[in-house]
Image (tube, rainbow, N blue to C red):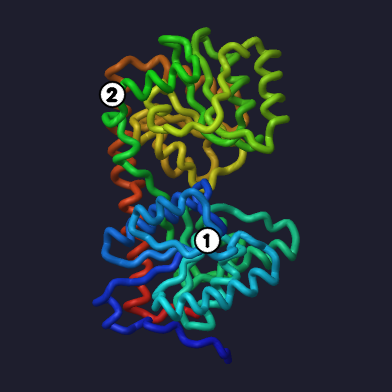
Protein backbone atom coordinates (compact mmCIF):
# COMPACT_ATOMS: atom_id res chain seq x y z
CA UNK A 1 0.00 0.00 0.00
CA UNK A 2 1.10 3.61 -0.53
CA UNK A 3 -0.05 7.01 0.62
CA UNK A 4 1.03 8.68 -2.62
CA UNK A 5 -1.79 10.45 -4.47
CA UNK A 6 -2.78 8.90 -7.78
CA UNK A 7 -1.33 10.41 -10.95
CA UNK A 8 -3.89 13.10 -11.63
CA UNK A 9 -5.40 13.76 -15.05
CA UNK A 10 -4.16 10.46 -16.44
CA UNK A 11 -6.95 8.82 -18.38
CA UNK A 12 -9.02 12.01 -18.42
CA UNK A 13 -10.17 12.50 -22.03
CA UNK A 14 -10.75 16.23 -21.51
CA UNK A 15 -7.08 16.76 -20.87
CA UNK A 16 -6.11 16.20 -24.49
CA UNK A 17 -8.53 18.96 -25.51
CA UNK A 18 -6.54 21.72 -23.82
CA UNK A 19 -2.94 22.90 -23.88
CA UNK A 20 -0.50 21.27 -21.48
CA UNK A 21 1.51 23.15 -18.89
CA UNK A 22 4.93 21.52 -18.62
CA UNK A 23 7.47 22.42 -15.94
CA UNK A 24 11.11 21.59 -16.73
CA UNK A 25 13.57 21.69 -13.82
CA UNK A 26 17.36 21.85 -14.03
CA UNK A 27 20.21 23.33 -11.95
CA UNK A 28 20.96 26.42 -14.07
CA UNK A 29 20.76 27.89 -17.55
CA UNK A 30 24.40 28.66 -18.26
CA UNK A 31 25.69 26.40 -21.03
CA UNK A 32 25.71 22.75 -22.06
CA UNK A 33 23.65 20.02 -23.66
CA UNK A 34 21.10 19.77 -20.82
CA UNK A 35 20.48 23.49 -21.01
CA UNK A 36 20.24 23.48 -24.81
CA UNK A 37 17.74 20.63 -24.70
CA UNK A 38 15.66 22.53 -22.16
CA UNK A 39 15.55 25.67 -24.30
CA UNK A 40 14.71 23.68 -27.43
CA UNK A 41 11.92 21.88 -25.60
CA UNK A 42 10.47 25.15 -24.31
CA UNK A 43 10.37 26.41 -27.89
CA UNK A 44 8.75 23.19 -29.14
CA UNK A 45 6.03 23.41 -26.49
CA UNK A 46 5.30 27.04 -27.32
CA UNK A 47 5.10 26.37 -31.06
CA UNK A 48 2.69 23.49 -30.38
CA UNK A 49 0.42 25.77 -28.34
CA UNK A 50 1.41 24.47 -24.91
CA UNK A 51 2.75 26.40 -21.93
CA UNK A 52 6.43 25.99 -21.10
CA UNK A 53 7.67 26.71 -17.58
CA UNK A 54 11.35 26.34 -16.68
CA UNK A 55 12.66 26.46 -13.11
CA UNK A 56 16.38 26.89 -12.45
CA UNK A 57 18.81 29.06 -10.52
CA UNK A 58 19.18 31.24 -13.62
CA UNK A 59 21.89 32.09 -16.11
CA UNK A 60 22.34 33.88 -19.41
CA UNK A 61 20.23 31.29 -21.29
CA UNK A 62 17.12 32.45 -19.39
CA UNK A 63 16.72 35.02 -22.17
CA UNK A 64 16.59 32.21 -24.72
CA UNK A 65 13.84 30.47 -22.77
CA UNK A 66 11.82 33.67 -22.67
CA UNK A 67 12.45 34.50 -26.34
CA UNK A 68 11.19 31.03 -27.24
CA UNK A 69 7.88 31.73 -25.50
CA UNK A 70 8.69 30.02 -22.20
CA UNK A 71 8.47 31.41 -18.68
CA UNK A 72 11.33 31.16 -16.19
CA UNK A 73 11.03 30.78 -12.42
CA UNK A 74 14.18 31.37 -10.38
CA UNK A 75 14.71 28.84 -7.58
CA UNK A 76 17.97 27.66 -5.92
CA UNK A 77 17.89 24.36 -7.82
CA UNK A 78 21.64 24.25 -8.37
CA UNK A 79 22.23 23.62 -4.68
CA UNK A 80 22.99 20.13 -3.38
CA UNK A 81 22.57 21.28 0.22
CA UNK A 82 19.95 18.93 1.74
CA UNK A 83 18.19 21.77 3.55
CA UNK A 84 17.91 23.86 0.36
CA UNK A 85 16.76 20.81 -1.61
CA UNK A 86 14.08 20.17 1.03
CA UNK A 87 12.87 23.76 0.85
CA UNK A 88 12.71 23.46 -2.92
CA UNK A 89 10.15 20.66 -2.54
CA UNK A 90 7.65 23.03 -0.98
CA UNK A 91 8.33 25.78 -3.49
CA UNK A 92 7.88 23.41 -6.42
CA UNK A 93 4.75 21.92 -4.87
CA UNK A 94 3.20 25.37 -4.59
CA UNK A 95 4.28 26.20 -8.14
CA UNK A 96 2.74 23.01 -9.53
CA UNK A 97 -0.54 23.73 -7.80
CA UNK A 98 -0.70 27.47 -8.52
CA UNK A 99 0.17 27.14 -12.22
CA UNK A 100 -1.84 24.00 -12.92
CA UNK A 101 1.23 22.07 -14.05
CA UNK A 102 0.37 18.89 -15.97
CA UNK A 103 3.86 17.39 -16.33
CA UNK A 104 7.08 17.82 -14.34
CA UNK A 105 10.19 17.07 -16.40
CA UNK A 106 13.49 16.78 -14.52
CA UNK A 107 16.85 16.82 -16.28
CA UNK A 108 19.41 16.63 -13.45
CA UNK A 109 19.68 14.83 -10.13
CA UNK A 110 19.66 17.50 -7.40
CA UNK A 111 16.59 19.35 -8.73
CA UNK A 112 15.04 16.00 -9.69
CA UNK A 113 14.89 14.93 -6.04
CA UNK A 114 12.97 18.06 -5.08
CA UNK A 115 10.75 17.76 -8.16
CA UNK A 116 10.04 14.07 -7.52
CA UNK A 117 8.79 14.69 -3.98
CA UNK A 118 6.73 17.67 -5.17
CA UNK A 119 5.20 15.63 -8.01
CA UNK A 120 4.32 12.75 -5.66
CA UNK A 121 2.66 15.14 -3.24
CA UNK A 122 0.56 16.70 -6.00
CA UNK A 123 -0.02 13.58 -8.11
CA UNK A 124 1.59 15.29 -11.10
CA UNK A 125 3.20 12.95 -13.67
CA UNK A 126 7.00 12.94 -13.40
CA UNK A 127 9.29 12.58 -16.43
CA UNK A 128 13.09 12.41 -16.38
CA UNK A 129 15.70 12.63 -19.12
CA UNK A 130 18.95 10.74 -18.59
CA UNK A 131 21.52 12.71 -20.56
CA UNK A 132 24.50 10.52 -19.71
CA UNK A 133 25.80 7.71 -17.46
CA UNK A 134 26.18 8.60 -13.80
CA UNK A 135 29.08 7.78 -11.52
CA UNK A 136 27.87 4.87 -9.38
CA UNK A 137 31.11 3.88 -7.70
CA UNK A 138 29.59 3.63 -4.21
CA UNK A 139 26.24 3.05 -2.52
CA UNK A 140 25.70 6.73 -1.73
CA UNK A 141 26.20 7.75 -5.36
CA UNK A 142 23.90 4.99 -6.58
CA UNK A 143 21.19 6.13 -4.18
CA UNK A 144 21.62 9.74 -5.33
CA UNK A 145 21.40 8.69 -8.99
CA UNK A 146 18.28 6.62 -8.38
CA UNK A 147 15.88 9.54 -8.70
CA UNK A 148 16.51 9.71 -12.44
CA UNK A 149 15.17 6.17 -12.79
CA UNK A 150 11.95 6.99 -10.90
CA UNK A 151 10.21 8.81 -13.71
CA UNK A 152 6.76 7.71 -14.81
CA UNK A 153 8.53 7.97 -18.13
CA UNK A 154 12.34 7.93 -18.42
CA UNK A 155 13.78 9.40 -21.61
CA UNK A 156 17.11 8.07 -22.89
CA UNK A 157 18.98 10.28 -25.36
CA UNK A 158 20.43 7.32 -27.29
CA UNK A 159 20.32 3.54 -27.52
CA UNK A 160 23.60 3.59 -25.63
CA UNK A 161 21.80 5.30 -22.70
CA UNK A 162 18.82 2.95 -23.00
CA UNK A 163 21.19 0.02 -22.51
CA UNK A 164 22.86 1.84 -19.63
CA UNK A 165 19.43 2.12 -17.97
CA UNK A 166 18.80 -1.60 -18.45
CA UNK A 167 22.18 -2.45 -16.94
CA UNK A 168 22.10 0.07 -14.10
CA UNK A 169 18.41 0.09 -13.17
CA UNK A 170 17.15 -3.47 -13.80
CA UNK A 171 13.99 -2.73 -11.81
CA UNK A 172 13.02 0.00 -14.28
CA UNK A 173 10.49 -1.57 -16.69
CA UNK A 174 11.24 -1.22 -20.38
CA UNK A 175 7.67 0.00 -20.79
CA UNK A 176 8.59 3.24 -18.99
CA UNK A 177 11.68 3.98 -21.11
CA UNK A 178 11.49 6.11 -24.24
CA UNK A 179 14.49 6.69 -26.52
CA UNK A 180 14.49 10.21 -27.96
CA UNK A 181 17.71 11.45 -29.58
CA UNK A 182 18.74 15.04 -29.14
CA UNK A 183 18.14 17.29 -32.11
CA UNK A 184 19.98 19.96 -34.06
CA UNK A 185 18.57 23.24 -35.37
CA UNK A 186 18.67 22.75 -39.14
CA UNK A 187 18.17 26.47 -39.77
CA UNK A 188 21.19 27.37 -37.67
CA UNK A 189 23.39 24.53 -38.90
CA UNK A 190 22.89 25.07 -42.61
CA UNK A 191 25.98 25.58 -44.74
CA UNK A 192 23.97 27.66 -47.23
CA UNK A 193 23.23 30.18 -44.49
CA UNK A 194 26.90 30.81 -43.67
CA UNK A 195 28.19 33.91 -45.44
CA UNK A 196 31.79 34.07 -46.66
CA UNK A 197 32.27 37.03 -44.35
CA UNK A 198 31.57 34.92 -41.26
CA UNK A 199 34.11 32.33 -42.38
CA UNK A 200 36.75 34.91 -43.22
CA UNK A 201 36.25 36.66 -39.90
CA UNK A 202 36.69 33.43 -37.98
CA UNK A 203 39.68 32.29 -40.02
CA UNK A 204 41.41 35.62 -39.46
CA UNK A 205 40.61 35.60 -35.75
CA UNK A 206 42.25 32.19 -35.50
CA UNK A 207 45.14 33.15 -37.84
CA UNK A 208 44.67 30.02 -39.94
CA UNK A 209 46.98 29.54 -42.94
CA UNK A 210 45.26 30.18 -46.26
CA UNK A 211 44.30 27.03 -48.13
CA UNK A 212 45.37 24.57 -45.45
CA UNK A 213 43.10 21.57 -44.77
CA UNK A 214 41.38 22.22 -41.42
CA UNK A 215 40.68 19.36 -39.02
CA UNK A 216 38.16 20.72 -36.52
CA UNK A 217 37.93 19.05 -33.10
CA UNK A 218 35.11 20.69 -31.09
CA UNK A 219 34.75 20.02 -27.37
CA UNK A 220 36.04 21.03 -23.96
CA UNK A 221 39.72 20.39 -23.28
CA UNK A 222 39.32 17.41 -20.99
CA UNK A 223 41.34 14.22 -21.12
CA UNK A 224 38.51 11.85 -22.01
CA UNK A 225 37.79 13.87 -25.16
CA UNK A 226 41.00 12.43 -26.62
CA UNK A 227 42.73 15.55 -27.99
CA UNK A 228 46.14 13.93 -27.48
CA UNK A 229 45.13 11.17 -29.94
CA UNK A 230 44.41 13.85 -32.54
CA UNK A 231 47.81 15.46 -32.05
CA UNK A 232 49.53 12.12 -32.53
CA UNK A 233 47.38 11.45 -35.61
CA UNK A 234 48.38 14.84 -37.04
CA UNK A 235 52.03 13.82 -36.81
CA UNK A 236 51.21 10.72 -38.89
CA UNK A 237 49.37 12.51 -41.72
CA UNK A 238 51.00 12.57 -45.15
CA UNK A 239 49.72 16.10 -45.81
CA UNK A 240 52.24 18.47 -44.16
CA UNK A 241 49.92 21.46 -44.47
CA UNK A 242 46.91 20.10 -42.54
CA UNK A 243 46.16 21.90 -39.28
CA UNK A 244 44.13 20.92 -36.22
CA UNK A 245 41.80 23.40 -34.52
CA UNK A 246 40.73 22.55 -30.98
CA UNK A 247 37.56 24.59 -30.37
CA UNK A 248 36.56 24.31 -26.73
CA UNK A 249 37.06 25.87 -23.32
CA UNK A 250 39.89 24.91 -20.98
CA UNK A 251 38.71 26.42 -17.69
CA UNK A 252 39.96 24.19 -14.90
CA UNK A 253 42.04 22.14 -17.32
CA UNK A 254 44.92 24.50 -18.04
CA UNK A 255 47.51 21.87 -17.02
CA UNK A 256 46.09 19.45 -19.59
CA UNK A 257 46.28 22.15 -22.28
CA UNK A 258 49.94 22.72 -21.42
CA UNK A 259 50.50 18.96 -21.67
CA UNK A 260 48.96 18.97 -25.15
CA UNK A 261 51.16 21.87 -26.24
CA UNK A 262 54.26 20.05 -25.05
CA UNK A 263 53.18 16.89 -26.86
CA UNK A 264 52.70 18.83 -30.10
CA UNK A 265 56.15 20.35 -29.68
CA UNK A 266 57.75 16.96 -29.08
CA UNK A 267 56.10 15.57 -32.22
CA UNK A 268 57.12 18.56 -34.31
CA UNK A 269 53.60 19.75 -35.11
CA UNK A 270 53.23 22.65 -32.67
CA UNK A 271 52.91 25.20 -35.52
CA UNK A 272 49.96 23.22 -36.94
CA UNK A 273 47.93 22.98 -33.71
CA UNK A 274 45.52 25.80 -32.81
CA UNK A 275 43.81 26.17 -29.43
CA UNK A 276 41.07 28.71 -30.12
CA UNK A 277 38.99 28.38 -26.95
CA UNK A 278 35.21 28.53 -26.87
CA UNK A 279 33.77 29.35 -30.29
CA UNK A 280 30.74 31.64 -30.45
CA UNK A 281 29.96 30.78 -34.08
CA UNK A 282 30.11 27.01 -34.41
CA UNK A 283 28.22 26.89 -37.74
CA UNK A 284 30.96 29.05 -39.31
CA UNK A 285 33.60 26.85 -37.65
CA UNK A 286 32.09 23.74 -39.25
CA UNK A 287 31.92 25.53 -42.58
CA UNK A 288 35.67 26.20 -42.39
CA UNK A 289 36.47 22.55 -41.70
CA UNK A 290 37.72 20.05 -44.24
CA UNK A 291 36.84 17.30 -41.76
CA UNK A 292 35.38 17.25 -38.24
CA UNK A 293 36.62 14.77 -35.66
CA UNK A 294 35.21 13.62 -32.33
CA UNK A 295 38.09 11.75 -30.70
CA UNK A 296 36.62 10.75 -27.32
CA UNK A 297 38.33 7.80 -25.66
CA UNK A 298 35.27 7.20 -23.46
CA UNK A 299 31.70 6.78 -24.78
CA UNK A 300 29.70 9.87 -25.64
CA UNK A 301 26.14 9.62 -24.35
CA UNK A 302 24.89 11.06 -27.64
CA UNK A 303 27.51 13.10 -29.46
CA UNK A 304 26.08 16.44 -30.58
CA UNK A 305 29.26 17.35 -32.51
CA UNK A 306 28.73 14.52 -34.98
CA UNK A 307 25.13 15.56 -35.63
CA UNK A 308 25.94 19.26 -36.08
CA UNK A 309 28.84 18.41 -38.38
CA UNK A 310 26.72 16.18 -40.60
CA UNK A 311 23.94 18.77 -40.67
CA UNK A 312 26.57 21.11 -42.14
CA UNK A 313 27.50 18.45 -44.70
CA UNK A 314 31.00 17.95 -43.36
CA UNK A 315 32.93 14.65 -43.42
CA UNK A 316 32.78 13.40 -39.84
CA UNK A 317 35.08 11.03 -37.97
CA UNK A 318 34.00 9.59 -34.61
CA UNK A 319 35.35 6.96 -32.28
CA UNK A 320 33.33 3.76 -32.56
CA UNK A 321 31.92 3.78 -29.03
CA UNK A 322 28.82 5.16 -27.35
CA UNK A 323 26.08 7.28 -28.85
CA UNK A 324 28.16 8.72 -31.70
CA UNK A 325 28.01 5.33 -33.44
CA UNK A 326 24.24 5.80 -33.73
CA UNK A 327 24.49 9.08 -35.62
CA UNK A 328 27.26 8.47 -38.19
CA UNK A 329 26.74 5.96 -40.99
CA UNK A 330 30.20 4.50 -41.65
CA UNK A 331 31.57 5.07 -45.15
CA UNK A 332 28.42 6.98 -46.11
CA UNK A 333 28.27 10.09 -43.91
CA UNK A 334 31.59 9.61 -42.11
CA UNK A 335 33.82 7.05 -40.45
CA UNK A 336 34.12 5.16 -37.19
CA UNK A 337 37.65 4.71 -35.82
CA UNK A 338 39.04 2.69 -32.98
CA UNK A 339 39.24 4.76 -29.77
CA UNK A 340 42.71 5.82 -28.65
CA UNK A 341 44.22 4.66 -31.96
CA UNK A 342 46.10 7.49 -33.66
CA UNK A 343 46.94 5.47 -36.75
CA UNK A 344 43.30 4.58 -37.39
CA UNK A 345 42.27 8.20 -36.82
CA UNK A 346 44.95 9.44 -39.24
CA UNK A 347 43.76 6.95 -41.87
CA UNK A 348 40.15 8.22 -41.73
CA UNK A 349 41.19 11.88 -41.70
CA UNK A 350 43.41 11.32 -44.76
CA UNK A 351 40.49 9.76 -46.64
CA UNK A 352 38.33 12.79 -45.85
CA UNK A 353 40.99 15.32 -46.83
CA UNK A 354 41.76 13.51 -50.09
CA UNK A 355 38.16 13.53 -51.37
CA UNK A 356 37.54 15.53 -54.54
CA UNK A 357 34.66 17.99 -54.77
CA UNK A 358 32.10 15.60 -56.32
CA UNK A 359 32.82 13.08 -53.56
CA UNK A 360 32.47 15.78 -50.90
CA UNK A 361 29.20 16.97 -52.42
CA UNK A 362 27.77 13.45 -52.48
CA UNK A 363 28.77 12.80 -48.87
CA UNK A 364 27.30 16.16 -47.82
CA UNK A 365 23.96 15.33 -49.45
CA UNK A 366 23.80 11.97 -47.68
CA UNK A 367 24.79 13.47 -44.33
CA UNK A 368 22.27 16.31 -44.42
CA UNK A 369 19.46 13.97 -45.48
CA UNK A 370 20.38 11.58 -42.67
CA UNK A 371 20.22 14.29 -40.01
CA UNK A 372 16.99 15.78 -41.37
CA UNK A 373 15.34 12.37 -41.21
CA UNK A 374 16.46 11.47 -37.72
CA UNK A 375 18.07 14.15 -35.56
CA UNK A 376 16.37 17.55 -35.80
CA UNK A 377 15.18 19.55 -32.82
CA UNK A 378 11.72 19.55 -34.42
CA UNK A 379 11.61 15.76 -34.25
CA UNK A 380 12.95 15.82 -30.68
CA UNK A 381 10.19 18.21 -29.66
CA UNK A 382 7.44 16.22 -31.36
CA UNK A 383 8.64 12.95 -29.84
CA UNK A 384 8.86 14.44 -26.35
CA UNK A 385 5.42 16.03 -26.54
CA UNK A 386 4.12 12.62 -27.63
CA UNK A 387 5.51 11.23 -24.36
CA UNK A 388 3.74 13.97 -22.40
CA UNK A 389 0.51 13.14 -24.21
CA UNK A 390 0.74 9.52 -23.11
CA UNK A 391 -0.54 10.66 -19.73
CA UNK A 392 -3.73 11.89 -21.37
CA UNK A 393 -4.64 8.44 -22.58
CA UNK A 394 -3.42 5.98 -19.99
CA UNK A 395 -2.61 5.78 -16.31
CA UNK A 396 1.10 6.21 -15.69
CA UNK A 397 2.77 3.85 -13.19
CA UNK A 398 3.47 5.69 -9.95
Asked which secondary structure carries label 1, the reply is strand
Q: Residue 388's image quarter?
A: bottom left
Q: Residue at x 55, y 62 (%)?
A: 166
Can you give x and y, in whole percent of width and height, for residue 117 in the image? 57, 77
Mark 1 lies on residue: 56
Side of 97 where 296 appears, left or right: right
Residue furthest left in the image: 17
Q: Is residue 148 visible?
A: no
Mark-to-mark CA distance, 1 and 2 = 43 Å
Q: Quadrant of the N terminus?
A: bottom right
The answer to whether residue 227 is above or below residue 150 is: above
Q: Residue at x 33, y 39 (%)?
A: 188
Q: Residue at x 59, y 64 (%)?
A: 76
Residue 324, numbered circle:
none
Between residues 343 and 59, which one lies in front from this camera angle? 59
Residue furthest top in the image: 240
The answer to whether residue 54 is above or below residue 320 is: below
Q: For mark 2, does the 10 Å Cα neighbourhood hold few (<14), some (14 to 19), or many (20 or more) residues? A: some
The answer to whether residue 108 is above or below residue 235 is: below
Can you give x and y, in whole percent of width and height, for residue 3 in the image? 57, 90
Q: Residue at x 56, y 20 (%)?
A: 274
Q: Earlier in the sequence, mark 1 or mark 2?
A: 1
Mark 2 lies on residue: 361
Closer to the eye: label 1 or 2? 1
Q: Are marks 1 and 2 in contact (CB under 8 Å)?
A: no
Asked which secondary structure carries label 2, the reply is helix
Q: Is residue 168 visible?
A: yes
Q: Residue 237's image quarter?
A: top right
Can you give x and y, in whole percent of width and height, for residue 379 in the image? 32, 53
Q: Residue 289's image quarter?
A: top left
Between residues 301 and 210, which one lies in front from this camera angle? 210
Between residues 44 and 170, which one lies in front from this camera angle? 44
Amino acid sequence: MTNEPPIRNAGNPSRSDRPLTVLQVLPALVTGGVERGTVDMAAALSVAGHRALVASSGGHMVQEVERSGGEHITLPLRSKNPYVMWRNIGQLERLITAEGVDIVHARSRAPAWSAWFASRRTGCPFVTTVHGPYNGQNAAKRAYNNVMFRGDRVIATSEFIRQYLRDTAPDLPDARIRMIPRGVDMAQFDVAAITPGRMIQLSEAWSLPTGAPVILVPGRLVRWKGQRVMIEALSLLKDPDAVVVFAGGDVGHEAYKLELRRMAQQLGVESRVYFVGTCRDMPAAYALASVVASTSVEPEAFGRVAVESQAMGRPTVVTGIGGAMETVIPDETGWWVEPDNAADLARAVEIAIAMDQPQRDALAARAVAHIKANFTKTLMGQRTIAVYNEFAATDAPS
